[in-house]
Image: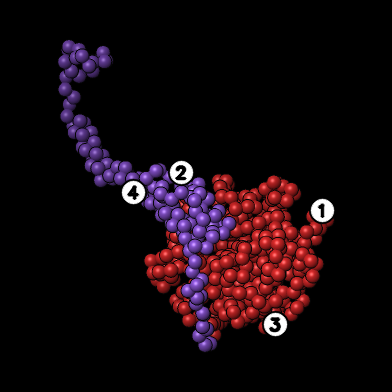
Chain colours: A red, B purple
């Protein structure tokens, strides 16, 4: 058993908001050619006049992507298929500028959807990406908005939903948290939201029915310090600007038009909270991901996937065409952090947010039924303990723990 | 490795008057639906349909989230108050055991010939 897996006791997942892989990590191909980012001046999208708009490193922290780029199902359909609605269509990732143009009818402004961040502007995310493992093929679970994509992280399915309406799961498919606390032997799990003013996006089921599952970000910091972290933790960022106990709390979810730097500070604080406890650092894997791409460009076409047992009809999708949850959403930045991961690692297998409950269930519980077909077919990002471990699949592959991992001044 | 500096956002990043996004709108809607199921004493005094800005949404989100937690806590407290005391049960069982033991040792008293108003008409026991 590789020591990184043998010692692993905690999995922590942080899910940020609405930024695509190329937008945040595209610049890193120039530093590590194994990261499937952007070649200079190579990826373009046509604007509404038919001119080719290049991807450029001109992204700003705030006040640029206004209005919020459309990321509901019909808009994402246009972004992925470029406006092709034929039955035999293939994804070409040529509709981002056209989609953004639809919101303000401003040609110059629509081109800003093709901007990405240069490495220097994102010291935390890019450092973690270069130091640990980047997933080159982690996609949003569906080509649509936040609530349904987050549902895949909690339940392995969105129960047929592709919109922002509340989801009331049937009794049959349990959340990963319920599985953990119902398992024999019992495991522990918690959802840490930022505070009660930011709260959770999982209101309809988890907050209403199991509020005891929730803790706050400040409790997460204490739990890390005191060695009380549960087996599985899911962290939600601050979704709104508000007055907190210690003054102004700036939203740090990075959802446009919230300040991206605030999200960098948040990510660094979570990383340091784990790293500053040596026992936790050697026994924890931290996954940082984003719920969906937020309408922002990416060059990698999302693949098809096995269907779910649910279908969204043509009215629900807003396109007139039903959706059988058989295609993933746009690629999102996803990084796995652990001192057992070699520097500069990349993973090219396909994942989506259903991989989160799939991995956590397999690692801590083993077999569990019933689960959605999307979850049972999703790949896992941490190999289970016990039994033979395929070295080609194990990301926590080092024989000796690293001592050269970065620190951030938060 | 050297300590990596993480710049903080400027003060201008904070804007509670920012119009709320569709995501925040959906969160408010979900909480409004949850609030409609709470007893009146837990409900906020904010009309959710009038919320327009992030700051307004934040206030409502906090009120309802805390109300949900409070309602569950109150229900938990009420549940623990209703539970019978285990200690009382033990004393009752012990008292019953003593009484049974005492009855076995003492001969049963002769029943009176007259029927009492409460008599069921059962046959007299033979001594």
The residue marked by circle 4 belongs to what chain? B
Q: Which mark is residue A87?
A: 1
Bin the neighbour count of mark 4 within 10 Å (Cα to Cα): few under 14, some 14-19, many 20 and up: few
Give how far apart the Cα atoms at labels 3 and 4 are: 59 Å
Asked if both marks, 1 and 4, belong to the same chain, the answer given is no
Tag 1–tag 4 contact (CB < 8 Å)? no
Q: Nearer the viewer, residue A386 or A405?
A: A405
Task: Decide if residue A362 is in sight here.
Answer: no
Element carrying mark 1: loop
* Residue B15 position within the rendered picture, expressed as x and y whole percent measured from the top left: 49, 66
- Taking the spot 78% from the left edge, 59% from the top edge, the residue there is A83
Q: In this view, does B108 lie above or below A200?
A: above
- Taking the spot 20% from the left edge, 19% from the top edge, the residue there is B127
Q: Mark 2 points at which residue?
A: B37
Name the image quarter holding residue B108: top left
Tag 3–tag 4 contact (CB < 8 Å)? no
Q: Is residue A368 left or right of residue A187?
A: right
Give how far apart the Cα atoms at labels 3 and 2 are: 54 Å
The residue marked by circle 1 belongs to what chain? A
Q: Name the residue under label 4.
A: B77
* Residue A103 position within the rendered picture, expressed as x and y whole percent measured from the top left: 67, 60
Give how far apart the Cα atoms at labels 1 and 2 are: 44 Å
Give how far apart the Cα atoms at labels 1 and 4 are: 58 Å
Of labels 1 and 4, the one closer to you: 1
Q: Name the residue under label 3.
A: A30
Name the image quarter holding residue A389: bottom right
Quarter of the N terminus of chain A within the rendering: bottom right
Label count reads 4
């Amino acid at each position: 058993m590789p020591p990184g897996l043998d010692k692993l006791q905690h999995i922590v997942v942080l899910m940020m908001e609405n930024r695509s892989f190329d937008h945040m990590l595209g610049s890193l191909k120039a530093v590590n050619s194994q990261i499937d980012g952007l070649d200079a001046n190579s990826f373009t999208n046509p604007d509404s006049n038919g001119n080719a708009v290049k991807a450029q490193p001109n992204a700003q922290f705030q006040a640029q992507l206004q209005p919020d780029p459309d990321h509901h199902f019909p808009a994402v359909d246009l972004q992925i298929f470029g406006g092709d609605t034929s039955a035999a269509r293939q994804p070409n990732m040529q509709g981002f500028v056209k989609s953004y143009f639809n919101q303000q009818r401003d040609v110059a402004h629509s081109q800003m959807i093709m901007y990405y961040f240069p490495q220097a502007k994102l010291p935390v995310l890019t450092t973690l990406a270069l130091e640990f493992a980047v997933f080159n093929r982690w996609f949003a679970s569906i080509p649509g908005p936040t609530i349904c994509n987050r549902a895949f992280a909690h339940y392995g399915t969105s129960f047929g939903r592709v919109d922002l309406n509340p989801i009331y799961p049937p009794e049959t498919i349990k959340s990963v948290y319920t599985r953990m606390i119902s398992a024999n032997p019992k495991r522990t799990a918690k959802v840490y939201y930022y505070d009660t003013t930011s709260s959770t996006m999982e209101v309809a089921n988890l907050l209403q029915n199991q509020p005891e599952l929730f803790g706050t970000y400040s409790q997460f910091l204490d739990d890390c310090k005191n060695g009380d972290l549960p087996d599985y933790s899911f962290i939600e960022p601050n979704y709104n600007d508000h007055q907190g106990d210690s003054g102004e709390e700036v939203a740090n979810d990075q959802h446009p038009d919230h300040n991206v730097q605030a999200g960098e500070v948040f990510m660094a604080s979570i990383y340091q909270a784990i790293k500053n406890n040596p026992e936790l650092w050697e026994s924890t894997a931290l996954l940082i991901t984003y719920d969906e791409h937020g309408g922002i460009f990416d060059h990698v076409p999302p693949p098809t996937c096995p269907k779910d047992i649910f279908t969204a009809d043509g009215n629900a999708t807003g396109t007139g065409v039903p959706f059988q949850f058989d295609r993933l959403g746009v690629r999102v930045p996803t990084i796995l952090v652990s001192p057992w991961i070699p520097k500069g690692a990349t993973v090219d297998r396909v994942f989506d947010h259903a991989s989160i409950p799939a991995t956590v269930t397999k690692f801590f519980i083993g077999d569990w039924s019933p689960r959605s077909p999307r979850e049972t077919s999703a790949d896992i990002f941490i190999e289970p303990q016990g039994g033979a471990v395929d070295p080609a699949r194990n990301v926590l592959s080092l024989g000796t723990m690293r001592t050269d991992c970065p620190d951030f001044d938060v | 490795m050297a300590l990596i500096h993480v710049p903080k956002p400027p003060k201008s990043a904070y804007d509670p008057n920012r119009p709320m996004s569709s995501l925040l709108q959906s969160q408010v809607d979900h909480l409004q639906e949850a609030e409609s199921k709470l007893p009146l004493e837990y409900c906020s005094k904010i009309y959710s349909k009038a919320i327009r800005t992030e700051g307004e949404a934040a206030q409502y989100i906090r009120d309802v989230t805390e109300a949900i937690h409070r309602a569950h806590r109150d229900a938990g407290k009420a549940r623990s108050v209703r539970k019978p005391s285990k200690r009382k049960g033990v004393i009752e069982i012990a008292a019953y055991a003593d009484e049974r033991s005492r009855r076995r040792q003492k001969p049963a008293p002769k029943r009176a010939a007259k029927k009492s108003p409460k008599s069921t008409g059962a046959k007299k026991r033979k001594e």
